[in-house]
Amino acid sequence: MRIASDIGVKWHGFIFDSPSTPGRLRYKWQTMNNPLITRAEAEDNESVLELMEQFAGALNLTWDRALREANLRHLSDHPSVGGVWLIRDEGKAAGYLALTTMFSFEFGGVCVLLDELFVATAHQGRGLAASALVELDKIADSMGARQVFLEAAEATPKLPEMYARQGFSRRPYYNYHRPVGTAAES
């Protein structure tokens, strides 16, 4: 991914080369409140890891820095699997979104999972998460996705309303998971 900017116009254009989408797709996002979303590069890893640790703390998740570093390297080495995008506010790393790809016959092919969306406490209440969700559609489209999925922790009661305002709806499905290799013997 390459980033091009024109400082006089106050926009940043992103070019995402996707193996599932021929050619290069370009889009630009106006930076009205001066938030900026950029795909995280290796030099951003420390900022991303600091934000991820804050996210884990806010939701009482187990924090495993080595695993998170390995996952960032994997996404960097395999961009078609997904990536992390930094949300900047006034030039500072204020949050991030983590997207991964998946495939669903039911939902029309390539889809993306918004695995994590986080805005640091000092930057909350400024519309950054809502702006990131608008930008998410452009990123997902550039990845060839037809649907965006997300999970929201029940411990974050304000999120369903924000997601509904952004066009997300709850599906009447149970959400299950299990670690690979833990299937019960029949």
Image (cartoon, helix red, strand yellow):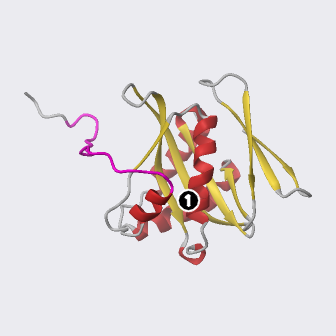
At label 1, which amino acid type do we have? Leu
- Estimate the x, y position of residue 174 in percent, counting from the top left: 23, 45
Q: Residue at x 88, y 56 (%)?
A: 9
- Estimate the x, y position of residue 148 in percent, counting from the top left: 48, 42
Does residue 78 lie above or below 50 as drawn?
A: above
Left or right: 128 in relation to 65: right
Left or right: 85 in relation to 58: right
- Estimate the x, y position of residue 114 in percent, counting from the top left: 48, 48
- Secondary structure under tag 1 reads helix
Asked if residue 167 lies in the magenta stretch, the reply is yes
> Please, what is the dominant secondary structure of the magenta stretch?
loop
- On-image quarter of the C terminus: top left
Q: Residue at x 84, y 50 (%)?
A: 5
Asked if residue 47 lies in the magenta stretch, the reply is no
Q: Residue at x 51, y 33 (%)?
A: 146
Q: Which residues are magenta?
A: 166-182
Identify the image quadrant of residue 137: top right
The residue to which callout 1 is attached is 49
